[in-house]
Amino acid sequence: MYRFKLQTLLNHRRHQEEVCQKELAEAQRDLSDAQEKLRCIKRDKRDNIQKLQAMQNECHNASEVLLFINYIEQLSRDLDSQLQQAHSASKHVTQKRDNLIAIMKKRKTLEKLKEKGWLEYQKKMMQAERKFNDEVAATRHIRKISS
């Protein structure tokens, strides 16, 4: 029976790949969450700017207008912070994807080596079987001639 000498390493590579796939999925979820927060902050900022413009047209008191302006400035700071987080999450996804690709290449290399070994094993077994059958046929032929 064929036994691949590096089967333990191949199993380890498969496990590494599974772990890396889970890490990539988690990183992609984090990126998606960061992008969703970014959209919410942009929408909130846009809505509050529209409210501020409407308030200025209606001549509300200065303290309310100042309150809206301060809130919009805070949203701008939050937006900048969230942009950085989304950019960081995007880099993390790219890094995890690159890691997964590298691990997959290593695993595929081992699988090709295993396949090559398997084909070589089958070839040797077929040669041995052919040799055995030839010997049996030769022995039968000699017996027929002798009798």
Image: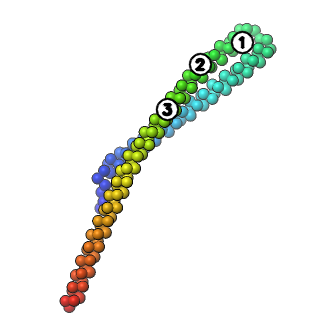
Describe residue 99's horizontal placement relative to residue 44 as left or right: left
Query: Of label 2 and label 3, which has the lower sequence position?
Result: 2
The amino acid type of the residue labelled 1 equals Val
User: Where is residue 40 shown, x and y percent of the image?
Assistant: 63, 27
- Residue most toward the right? 58
Q: Residues within 10 Å of mark 3 (few under 14, many from 20)?
A: some
Q: Nearer the viewer, mark 1 or mark 2?
A: 2
Query: Of label 1 and label 2, which has the lower sequence position?
Result: 1
User: Where is residue 74 shown, x and y percent of the image?
Assistant: 61, 17
- The residue positioned 63% from the left and 16% from the top of the image is 73
Q: Image height check: is 43 above or below 101?
A: above
Q: Residues within 10 Å of mark 1 (few under 14, many from 20)?
A: some
Quadrant location of the N terminus? bottom left
- The residue positioned 34% from the left and 59% from the top of the image is 118
Q: What residue would you read off at disc 3? A: 91
Q: Is residue 23 visible?
A: no
- The residue positioned 37% from the left and 52% from the top of the image is 111
Describe residue 18's horizontal placement relative to residue 72 as left or right: left
Describe residue 44's horizontal placement relative to residue 103 as left or right: right
Q: Image height check: is 109 above or below 91?
A: below
Q: Image height check: is 40 above or below 3?
A: above
Q: Which mark is residue 65?
A: 1
Q: Which mark is residue 77?
A: 2
Describe residue 45's horizontal placement relative to residue 138 as left or right: right
Task: Give the structural element (helix, strand or loop) at label 1.
Answer: helix
